[in-house]
């Protein structure tokens, strides 16, 4: 998903600061959650938001996701496509279209 230019820039940034030593999978997963909370905070009291702030927080979430994928040796494109396929099976178009029902309840008629 990230371009080779983005990956290289992130790796250089981390290497220049010798931060890889702190990037355990556990720490990166924690950081993703923390940054996701900060992203959610942008919408805490209103659906209105500051575009620049949301972009900055979203960039933090994505950056940590990229770091985690790199650390555990997975290809983001591959895992996203794999997950999409399993989700496609859980949510068949004929049952899920236009509904936000959990997959375990899709066989039930809408209320």
Image (cartoon, rainbow, N blue to C red):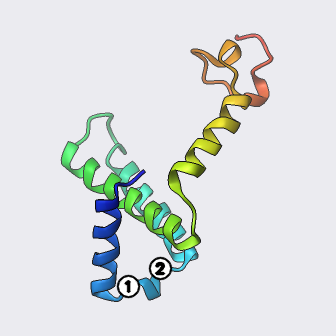
Residue nearest the observer in this picture, 26 or 13:
13
Residue nearest the observer in this picture, 77 or 36:
77
- Element marked by disc 2: loop
Label 2, residues with CA under 10 Å away: few <14, some 14-19, many ≥20: some
Q: Position of residue 77 (x, y in %)?
A: 51, 49
Residue, x 49% and y 71% (percent of image)? 28
Residue, x 57% and y 69% (percent of image)? 73
Residue, x 19% and y 48% (percent of image)? 52
Tags 1 and 2 in contact by the CB under 8 Å rule?
A: yes
Mark 1 = which residue? 19
Say whether residue 49 is left or right of residue 33: left
* Up/down of 55 relative to 14, above or below: above
Q: Position of residue 76 (x, y in %)?
A: 51, 54
In the rendered image, the quadrant that contains the C terminus is: top right
Q: Position of residue 18 (x, y in %)?
A: 35, 89
* Up/down of 90 relative to 36, above or below: above
Q: In the current view of this chain or complex, which residue is farthest to the front? A: 4
Mark 2 = which residue? 23
Label 1, residues with CA under 10 Å away: few <14, some 14-19, many ≥20: few
- Disc 1 versus disc 2: distance between alpha carbons? 7 Å
- Element marked by disc 1: loop
- Give the total number of marks visible in the rendering: 2
């Amino acid at each position: 998903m990230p371009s080779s230019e983005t990956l290289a820039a992130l790796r250089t940034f981390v290497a220049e600061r010798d931060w890889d030593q702190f990037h355990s999978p556990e720490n990166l997963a924690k950081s993703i959650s923390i940054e996701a909370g900060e992203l959610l905070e942008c919408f805490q009291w209103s659906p209105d938001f500051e575009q620049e702030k949301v972009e900055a927080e979203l960039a933090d979430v994505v950056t940590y996701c990229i770091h985690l994928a790199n650390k555990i040796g997975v290809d983001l494109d591959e895992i996203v496509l794999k997950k999409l396929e399993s989700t496609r099976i859980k949510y068949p178009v004929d049952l899920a279209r236009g509904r936000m029902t959990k997959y375990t309840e899709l066989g039930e008629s809408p209320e």
